[in-house]
Amino acid sequence: MFGLGRLSHLAFDLVALSTIIAGVRRATGFAPATDLIKDQGLRSILESYFNLGESVFGFISGYIVNSKYFKRRLS
């Protein structure tokens, strides 16, 4: 059904999407309303998924802030 390549691609895409959602949350304050999900198991899975994006976003932000290849530009 899924080869290792397709599964890796899907996993990368899911992490990228979660990271984008984390960036939107940090930039705008808007976050997915997981409290509207009635099934506790599904809600827990989605909250873990969004927390993964927060962790990845934090790691990337920390790398960029401490990197000599990026500088802050104030508009």
Image (spheres, rainbow, N blue to C red):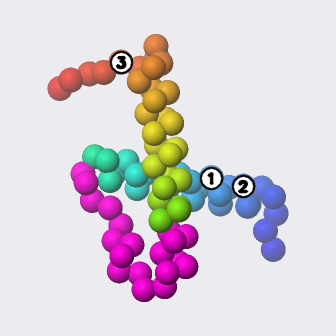
Separation of marks 2 and 1 at Cα, in angstroms: 6 Å
Earlier sequence position, callout 1 versus callout 3: 1
Q: Which residue is mark 1?
A: 12
Q: Are marks 2 and 1 in contact (CB under 8 Å)?
A: yes
Q: Which mark is residue 8?
A: 2
The outermost residue toward the bottom is 38
Above or below for 42 versus 70: below
Instruction: Give the CA distance from mark 3 to mark 2.
Output: 32 Å
> Which residue type does callout 1 highlight?
Phe
Residue drawn at x 35%, y 80% is 36
* Quarter of the view holding residue 45: bottom right
Question: Which residue, given by chain and number where applicable, does mark 3 sit on?
Answer: 71
Disc 1 packing (10 Å; few <14; some 14–19; many ≥20): few
Report the span colored magenta.
28-46
Looking at this view, is 40 or 52 the one in front?
Answer: 40
Residue 67 position, x and y percent, is: 47, 18
Q: Local crowd at mark 2 within 10 Å, few (<14), some, or many (≥20)?
A: few
